[in-house]
Amino acid sequence: MRLQLSLFGIGLLAVIGVWLTSCSPTGEALADRKQRENAEEIQQYITANNLQAEQLGSTGVYYVKTASAPGNQSAVTGDEVRFFVVSRRFDGTVIDSTDGINPAVYTFGTNAPRARAITNGSYLYNNITDGMLAGIIVGREGEKLTLLVPSYYDNGRYGTLTLPQYSPIRYDMRIVSVRTEDEQIREYIAANKITVTDTAAGGIRIAKTLARPDSALIKAGETATIRYTGRLLNGTQFDSNVPTAAAIASDPSSATAGYDVTVGQTAVVAGWTTGLQQVRRGEKFLLIFPSSQGYGSSGAPNSTVIGPFKPLLFEMEILRVR
């Protein structure tokens, strides 16, 4: 009897297994079905809410500009975009949002993971989604948009308790500003009341805070000993060799130590090579330049701070020249 039951059980399990296999769609079939269902849900939502929505190419994304500014600036590669966003389910439940005070900041560029990072307005692990990116692509500075985004387009996200994996999502966005790197630099200079004393090719600006006109300009091939602190324009510090009081107390020689750069030979960013030839021994200054003179479209290697298309600022002092 035990043997008969066991055989019966095995047979039943086999039948159930075959039935489940035949009823379960493959991954591809499931994706196709969810794509069709999302398209239907979006069309139903558009109809129910009487939206005059446009489709973004063949993406399945639909958008409505609720405040239009057709003459304003749109983002191109390298531009900094500031925006507010609220994400909702189609039943109106809010899933996430920027904080309402500080806009998210995104550098419009390549699709590399670091280029997708946003700062300030913390949202979805600080990464821009494809749905939000669609809003930036079709939007302009000052515009407000509503986007209806199918789940398959939105980064292949995982489901959560508040947003099931295959649910379409609604983004309400307001694009606060679109700024080129040069505009970012000019706004920073104006906001901080910086007096630019020298400029050089490539968008380099120098603001001398201590001038030594009696000294000779640094020349290519000379070695300058430099003290510096590097920052992004948002104030984030990424490097410094300025000794602390504790370091000087521990090692008095650090008070006069610096970083040696042989101009034109030491491997430094182009902004340094050009900028150092505009200054003299003993001078203190701010050196500001766009990413074309820094780390370009890739960002600094192994850095989580200097991403693609980031203008840089250095507070510098020339200790010695030889």
Image (cartoon, rainbow, N blue to C red):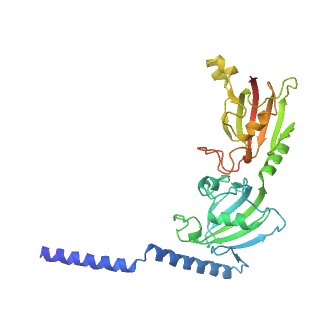
Q: Is the N terminus in the top left, top right, bottom left or bottom right quadrant? A: bottom left
What is the x, y in percent for residue 9?
Answer: 22, 75
Question: What percent of the width, then of the height, locates residue 182?
Answer: 80, 50
Q: Is residue 313 left or right of residue 250?
A: right
Q: Nearer the viewer, residue 105 or 99?
A: 105
Residue at image x 84%, y 25%? Answer: 216
**254 to 9, vertically: above or below:** above
At x 76%, y 31%, the residue is: 220
Q: Residue at x 64, y 44 (%)?
A: 300
Q: Pick the quarter of the image with the C terminus.
A: top right
Q: Residue at x 81, y 51 (%)?
A: 183
- Residue 27 appears in the rendering: yes
Q: Note whether 184 is above or below 17 in the view shown.
A: above
Rendered image quadrant of residue 225: top right
Q: Residue 293 at what x, y percent from top left? A: 73, 44
Compared across the picture, whether 15 is left or right of 267 comes to left
Q: Point out the residue furthest to the left here.
A: 1
Q: How many numbered circles are shown?
A: 0
Q: Is residue 194 visible?
A: no
User: Whole-percent x and y of residue 305?
Assistant: 64, 44
